[in-house]
């Protein structure tokens, strides 16, 4: 399958590498290819140019080009860039399933906050801004490495949450999570409005990350043992 | 020990019954004793008068009287009543440990929301309003029955979160949770500011309650196996 991964950060890298390894043709999309390839690494990520060299099968292209090829869109952009970036590619996104992994994080004032929550969510904003796109919120509640390798935590005995208004797209994402990535437990929380709860868990997640000193954990909902798709 | 439980709802009843059963002298506090005893039951709770008859050892008294006797305060009030009620009893609360179980829930517009979140929390509001009180946020992330009987879910293999600025009070609440109620895993998230994450998990909790059809569940943080007190 041809897949577009939007975003060259930790999350985009993890999905692009995994999907390519699984035999898919992956197009990783960015605003400016040369700038991205020249960019320095982050605190815990290597420079993207290095990563790209190590993953020669993954094509590094501009957003529009990646989306043109992608039969599935994996969107792993910074929270503050999501709506504007996707809106600029609206025509080519029309009718496609888009997995929204982004979180509305704001670390600007030295203080961790969400840019939207409670009576709205980034997932809903994306779906509202692009009504022709089938948005499925997923993977945003776990660390990038755990997203594509759930068995690395507690042998996979924990939960992935998904939400969205498009049933077939949710079945598809459920399939990707379980069959491609190895998730054992997926809980469908309902419509895209359920992205609120999925994004509002972030402050607790960040708090646990700080206390535990590792991002390699996840939540398991105890006394829940089946996959439910509404 | 003499303990004040504030609030006659489901959560207050659960703690009062459990603490009384454990041999403590429990004073359950309410605004108006006669009104509370005459009150009709809720959707899933029996009338408080019936509950009081079945728990003759628990003394039903007004807030001030309960707090006067309580060496420990278990506060299980409705979110919108918490600060005002506690503020009116400030003198008698001074210096005491208060377990804040309340959640800033707002179901008013047919739509579930929090009345405070993201850059503040009910736990912080309580601590700010009553600086002489040792506030520990705890138990608010689980159903009342599970709060005092954690083994009823997955044999107790799940987590309780606590937060607060007063170390000794947190040790005390940790002791109550583990030794009195039977919790096996308590995670200290840090200062009272961590109440934000604990309260912001509520939308996901309510969503899961709806999807699962039962409140008898809890979160387990996988790959976490020790009690940490900062």
Image: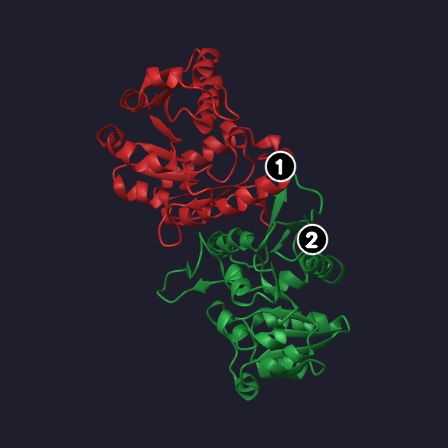
Chain colours: A green, B red
The relative height of residue A2 versus residue B133 in the rendered view (above or below) is: below
Foreground tag (2 vs 1): 1
Residue at x 25% of width, y 38% of height: B132
Instruction: Count neighbours of disc 1 (C-alpha within 10 A) and say few if under 14, some if 14 to 19, many if 20 or more.
Output: few
Image coordinates of residue A48 in percent, x first then y, are 58, 80
> Marks 2 and 1: same chain?
no
Image coordinates of residue A21 in percent, x first then y, are 74, 72
Residue identifier under label 1? B213
Q: Quadrant of residue A165?
A: bottom right
Query: Which chain is indicated by disc 2?
Result: A
Question: A25 or B168: which is nearer to us?
Answer: A25
Question: A64 or A94: which is nearer to us?
Answer: A94
Image coordinates of residue B167 in percent, x first then y, are 37, 42
Residue identifier under label 2? A156
Callout 2: SS: helix
**Quarter placement of the N terminus of chain A:** bottom right
């Amino acid at each position: 399958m041809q897949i577009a991964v939007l975003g060259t950060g930790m999350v985009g890298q993890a999905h692009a590498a995994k999907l390519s390894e699984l035999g898919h043709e992956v197009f990783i999309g960015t605003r400016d290819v040369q700038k991205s390839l020249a960019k320095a690494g982050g605190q815990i990520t290597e420079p993207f140019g290095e990563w790209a060299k190590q993953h020669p099968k993954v094509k590094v292209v501009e957003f529009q080009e990646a989306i043109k090829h992608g039969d599935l869109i994996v969107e792993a952009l910074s929270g503050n860039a999501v709506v504007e970036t996707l809106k600029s590619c609206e025509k080519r996104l029309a009718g496609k399933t888009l997995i929204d992994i982004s979180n509305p994080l704001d670390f600007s004032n030295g203080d961790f906050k969400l840019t939207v929550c409670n009576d709205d969510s980034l997932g809903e904003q994306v779906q509202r801004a692009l009504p022709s796109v089938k948005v499925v919120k997923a993977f945003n509640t776990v660390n990038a490495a755990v997203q594509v390798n759930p068995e690395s935590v507690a042998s996979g005995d924990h939960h992935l949450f998904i939400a969205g208004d498009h049933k077939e797209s949710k079945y598809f994402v459920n399939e990707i999570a379980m069959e491609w990535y190895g998730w054992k437990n997926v809980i469908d929380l309902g419509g895209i409005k359920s992205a609120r709860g999925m994004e509002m868990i972030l402050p607790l997640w960040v708090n646990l990350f700080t206390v535990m000193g590792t991002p390699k954990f996840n939540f398991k909902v105890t006394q829940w043992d089946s996959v439910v798709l509404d």
